[in-house]
Image (tube, rainbow, N blue to C red):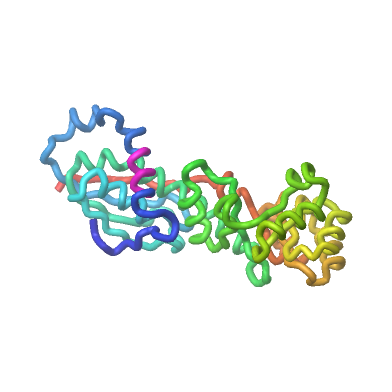
Amino acid sequence: MTATLDPITDALAPDTLDGLIQSALAEDIGAGDVTTDAVIPADMTCRGKIVCKEDGVIAGLSVAARVFALIDDRIRFDPKTRDGEKVQEDQIVARISGPARGMLKAERVALNFLQHLSGVATMTARYVKAVDGTRTKILDTRKTTPGLRGLEKYATRIGGAVNHRMGLYDAVLIKDTHLALVGGITPALRAVRKAYSDTDINVEVSNIQELEQALADKAPRILLDNFAPGQVREAMQIIRRRAEVEISGGVQVSNARAYALAGADYISVGALTHSATALDFSMKVTRY
C-alpha cells in the first residue's frame, strides 16, 4: 500500500478501525473465499481500478486502502482523488495492484465502506449547499449505524457538517424524555448545573411556553423541536439573541434554507447518517 493516504485518526483509533474491518472481513469471507480459492491460482497477480459510477462526494478512501492492506500487505493502493473531493460518474478514484486472490477477497468489504461513507458525505454536502451564504451550520446526530458512529461522523465532516455530540458522554442535551420524568425545564437545568457547573447546556423545547421557560432559566442553547419555518421566525422574535438556536425535526434539503433564513444558528439532521443512499462504486481487474 502506498503512504499517500491520510489515516482517519480523528475518527477512530487505528486498532479500533482495524477491529471494524476485521469483523466485516470475517462476516464476508468466513472460513474462506471458496470461489476465488478454487478459480484463481495462488501466484497470480493483477491490476485493478475502483470506479465511481455516479456523481457525489468521496469519503473513506483510507478505510478502503486499509481493507486491502489487512488482507495482503503486498497489495498496492494508489488513490487518484482525496476524501472530500467531488467525483463524477465513471471517474477512477483508485488504482490497485498485487496478488489477485487478496484483491478479490478484499473487494466487497472495501467497496461497502467506501460506498456507505461516500453516500453520507454526499448527502451532507447537499444540506450544506442548501444553507450556503447563511450563518447556519449543519449538524449531525446520534442516529448512526451501531458500531460505525466514528466513521459516519467523519464522513459528515468531510461533507461539510459540524459534529454534534459523539455520544451521551460529551455534551448535555436535555430532551423531552428528561423533562417528562423530572417535571420540566427548571428542575432539569438546576440538576445539570449542580452536577456540571461549567458545561454547555442545550435544552429541547416543543412549544412557545417551553421556550419562554428555557429563556427565563437562562438556557444558553435552545433546540426548537419540530417547529415549522414560520414558527421558528416567531420563536426568534422571542429569543432576540439571548440563546443560541438549533433546529431539529422535519428538516429536508428542500426546506433547509427556509429554516436557515428564519435565523437558526444550527440545524441538526439525522438523515445525514440514517437515510443516506450509498454512492455506487465498482472494481475492475485485469491480469498482468
Q: Is residue 20 magenta?
A: yes
Report whether residue 3 is seen: yes
Give the image location of residue 158, x and y in percent.
Answer: 49, 61
Q: Residue drawn 85% across and 52% down? A: 207
The secondary structure that most of the magenta stretch takes on is helix
Residue 233 in sight here: no
Residue found farthest to the left: 43
Image: magenta residue range? 17-23
Is residue 274 depicted above or below 125 in this figure? above
**Vertical position of residue 71 compared to residue 158: above or below:** above
Q: Position of residue 249 (x, y in %)?
A: 72, 50
Assign the N terminus to one quadrant of the image.
Answer: bottom left
Residue at the right extreme of this rendering: 209
Quadrant of residue 139 within the rendered picture: bottom right
Q: Nearer the viewer, residue 286 or 138?
A: 138
User: Which residue is at 19% across, 31% downward?
Assistant: 37
- Can residue 19 be found in the magenta stretch? yes
Residue 159 screen position, x and y as percent? 52, 60
Residue 211 horizontal/vertical position (percent): 83, 58
Query: Would residue 26 be found to the left or right of residue 87 on screen?
Result: left
Q: Residue at x 24, y 60 (%)?
A: 2
Which sits in the foreground, 221 or 276?
221
Question: Number of numbered discs present?
Answer: 0
Residue at 63 percent of width and 65 percent of height: 137
The quarter of the displayed image where residue 235 is located = bottom right
Which sits in the foreground, 179 or 105? 179
Q: Is residue 140 left or right of residue 286?
A: right
Residue furthest front in the image: 194
